[in-house]
Image (cartoon, grey):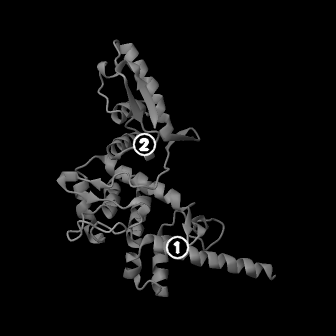
Amino acid sequence: MHTIDIPEANKSLYLPHSLAECDAAQYIEMCELIFRYQVGALTYSDLKVQAIYKLLNLQPSKKELLIVDEEAKWGNVYTLAQLIDTFFDDVDGQKVIKLEFTHTPVSLYRPLWRGYHGPRDSFMNVTFGEYLDGLRLFLDFAATGNTNLLYLLAAVFYRKAKLAQLFPKLNGDIREPYNSHTIEERAQVFKHGPIGFVYGFYLQFASFQKYITGAVIPWGGRELDLSILFEAGSGDQLEAVPGIGMDSLAFALAESGEFGNLEAVRKTNLWEILIRLYDLKKKDLDYKLNDKSKT
């Protein structure tokens, strides 16, 4: 967090350093500004100024910052606005939002007074089917920019709580079971809320994608490097941007029968599938290495 001291008011304000440090309300507000910047409706300078007011919950008046003249007020605002640069990286002269988090910034969303629960941190309670459907929509939006896809993407993962499970187990899923046929209905409800919510979930999904392509996770006293699933240079790797490739994995797993038929594969936990894919990939790499050493 950036700490902003105001001695005249004997108080301090705290500004998030990045999206990872925003609370739910700040996250939605900031993601709406980022979306408007991405579509060209806001300049980068205007984004930074508006972000200061939104994130610090300030009102556009002289009194808020104890400034007595207009010139001094805007000088102060523009100085503070430079702190928003920490939300972004400079990549070839372009401002790219930092995606360095795996938690769910908005765990509960209430459009039209209805509560919808998002996935747990690191998508721990997400099924492989949810992930496949979400990935398809994620890639489609990245390719087309069609905002309707953002509402559909959020509708895959945000669902009402189970009626019979008001107090779920710690590792359980409070959400209703995933049903791909109800996505459109939820997407229509989400259109009554701010674009910052659905674009924010798109950025969360992007951050998760970035994470799993290089994640090293503890497992049974060992560390598993998931990056081997996404390495380029061979014809049998899991592609980082797979398109139909990831769907074909679901069919391949169903054909093997290890997790059951295709419906059962889709209902299997995402991380269980990823760990099994890692195991298969590691065995294949070890076999190729041993075979090469014999020649």
Q: How crowded is mark 2: few (under 14 residues within 10 Å), some or many (20 or more)?
A: some
185 relative position to 259: left or right: left
Q: Which of the marked residues, 2 or 1, is nearer the chain's N terminus?
A: 2
- Of the pair 148 and 157, the residue shown nearer to us: 157
Q: Please give the name of the residue rendered at 29% of the width and 21% of the height, measured from the top-left corner.
A: 61
Depth check, mark 2 against mark 1: the one in front is 1
Real-space CA distance between mark 2 and mark 1, rounded to the nearest whole angstrom: 35 Å
Going by the picture, which residue comes out furthest to the right? 295
- The image shows residue 218 at horizontal and vertical percentages of 55, 66
Q: In this view, does 192 lie to the left or right of 204?
A: left
Q: Nearer the viewer, residue 205 or 76?
A: 76
Identify the residue at the far top of this view.
Answer: 69
- 219 horizontally vs 283: left or right: left
Q: In this view, does 201 lie above or below 36?
A: below
Where is residue 92? Give x, y as percent. Answer: 59, 41
For label 1, the residue is 275
Q: Can residue 124 be seen in this view?
A: yes
Q: Mark 2 — residue?
A: 38
Residue 32: quarter of image: top left
Q: In which quarter of the image is residue 126?
A: bottom left
Q: Dot 1, crowdedness within 10 Å: few (<14), some or many (≥20)?
A: some
- Residue 143 appears anywhere in the view: no
The secondary structure type at the circle numbered 2 is helix
Q: What residue type is labelled 2?
A: Gln
